[in-house]
Image (tube, helix red, strand yellow):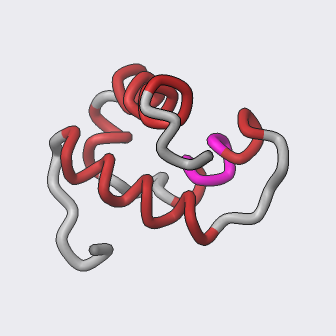
Amino acid sequence: MRDKLYDNADSFAMSFDEEWEKTDCDDIRLKINKVFELLSDHPFLISNPENARKIAEFRIFSLKKFQ
C-alpha cells in the first residue's frame, strides 16, 4: 500500500493497520507512536495529525481490531 498514499482517512487506516501488524511492541501507546514514526510521510498524518491519532485510537480501542 505504500506506493499509493492519499490524503484521506481510509488510506491512512489501511497504512496504519499494515504497519501495526509489522511493529513489535507490548505498550499500546508506544506502539502507536512507533507506527506514526513509520508513517510520518503519509499525507493524512501530515495534514491532519489530530484526526489521524483519533482514527488510530478508534481502531485499537473501540473496534478492538488488534486484540
- In magenta segment, residue 35: yes
Q: Is residue 22 above or below residue 10?
A: below
Instruction: Read off the magenta span.
Output: 32-36
Q: What is the x, y in percent for residue 39?
A: 47, 56
- The residue at the far bottom in this view is 3
The picture quadrant where one finds residue 23 is bottom right
The picture quadrant where one finds residue 54 is top left
24, 62: nearer the viewer: 62
User: Residue, x 34% and y 54% (percent of image)?
Assistant: 42
Q: Is residue 14 above or below residue 29?
A: below
Q: Is residue 62 above or below residue 40?
A: above
User: Residue, x 35% and y 23% (percent of image)?
Assistant: 51
Name the main secondary structure of what is drawn in magenta. Answer: helix
- In magenta segment, residue 26: no
Q: Is residue 62 above or below residue 32?
A: above
18, 52: nearer the viewer: 18
User: Residue, x 18% and y 71% (percent of image)?
Assistant: 4
Q: Is residue 1 left or right of residue 7?
A: right
Q: Is residue 60 left or right of residue 52?
A: right
Number of disc labels: 0
Q: What is the x, y in percent for residue 48?
A: 31, 28
Q: What is the x, y in percent for residue 12?
A: 30, 48
Q: Is residue 53 left or right of residue 43?
A: right
User: Residue, x 56% and y 58% (percent of image)?
Assistant: 20
Q: What is the x, y in percent for residue 14?
A: 30, 57
13, 52: nearer the viewer: 13
Looking at the rendered image, the quarter that the N terminus falls into is: bottom left
